[in-house]
Image (cartoon, grey):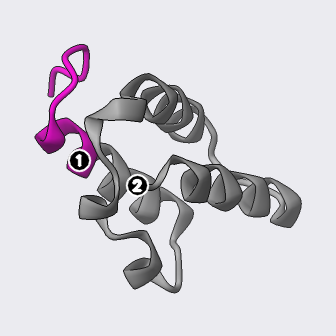
Amino acid sequence: MDLSNPSQQNVIYMIEQIKEKLRMVNVDAMQSDAFDEEKYEDLQYLYKMVMKRDSFSPSEMNAIVAELGSLRK
């Protein structure tokens, strides 16, 4: 998937991949449609960072979830 161009489809893809990678228990809290293209670069940066890692400490998970929360509409 080409993530270089901001689109709602790419936003949805990245959010879904982040949720899967983090194995988030409450996936309903991070609905893809709660994000838009306005903060695409920030979301893409977070997506790349999450995808590079194999595991996360509890504090890292909290920081990632907090960052996702700040990127919501």
Name the amino acid, label 2. Lys
52 vs 70, nearest the viewer: 70
Q: Which mark is residue 73?
A: 2
Region of the chain picked out in magenta, as a range: 1-13
Res. 11 image quadrant: top left
Q: Percent position (x, y) of residue 46?
A: 55, 35
Give, as a three-letter code, the residue at label 1: Tyr
Q: Secondary structure at mark 2?
A: loop
Q: Point out which mark residue 25 bears.
A: none
Above or below — where is 58 with respect to 15?
Answer: below
From the viewer's perspective, tell me whether residue 3 is left or right of residue 61: left
**Residue at 43 percent of width and 22 percent of height:** 41
Measured as percent of width and height from the top left, residue 54 is found at: 63, 46
Q: Which mark is residue 13?
A: 1
Q: Secondary structure at mark 1?
A: helix
| Position of 46 relative to 31 (above/below) | above
Disc 2 packing (10 Å; few <14; some 14–19; many ≥20):
few
**Looking at this view, is 36 or 51 the one in front?**
36
